[in-house]
Amino acid sequence: MIQFLVHEKADSVGVATVDITAGSDATGLYMDSQEGLTVKALDDIPLGHKIALTDLATGGSVTKYGEDIGKVVAEIKKGNHVHIHNLKTKRW
């Protein structure tokens, strides 16, 4: 069962299509290539929220849809929940 989708191969996050439980091996799919991937979830990831596909350092950027969607404000490890506690928009 696919548990998250990744819009483009260059994205650093995927989007949960179901609730993902911390400690589980979550199965994902790249939408552009239909290639599968697996990420060990370090946190609970609610439906519709982002899961990190790579480690991201504070001050770096998060990429989704092939676009820079924001600045990392707290260290993110592969498998972490990515949301407002560790990501801030660059728009304001």
Image: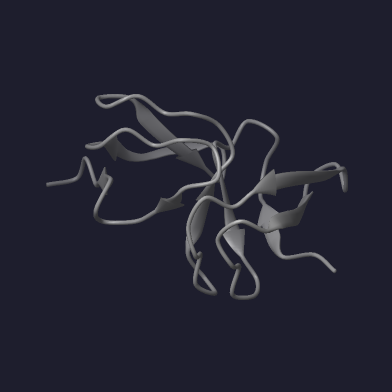
Q: Position of residue 84 (x, y in %)?
A: 26, 56
Q: Is residue 59 left or right of residue 22?
A: left
Of the 4 image quadrants, the one containing the N terminus is bottom right
As drawn, is 49 to the left or to the right of 23?
Answer: left
- Figure quadrant of residue 70: top left
x%, y% of residue 65? 56, 46
Q: How is the image coloured?
A: one colour
- Residue at the front extreme of this rendering: 23
Residue occupying image coordinates x 24% and y 53%: 85
Which one is nearer the viewer's eye here, 29 or 67? Answer: 29
- Near-viewer residue (50 or 69): 50
Name the spot of residue 14 as percent of width and height, x first.
59, 51
User: Relative to 81, is 28 on the left or the right?
Assistant: right
* Furthest residue toward left: 92
Instruction: Tell which of 38 and 87 is nearer to you.
Output: 38
Q: Give the residue drawn at x 68%, y 45%.
A: 39
Residue in front for this viewpoint, 60 or 39: 39
Badge count: 0
Question: Relative to residue 68, is residue 58 depicted above or below?
Answer: above
Q: Residue at x 64, y 75 (%)?
A: 18
Residue 35 sits in quarter:
top right
Question: In the figure, residue 8 lies in which quadrant?
Answer: top right
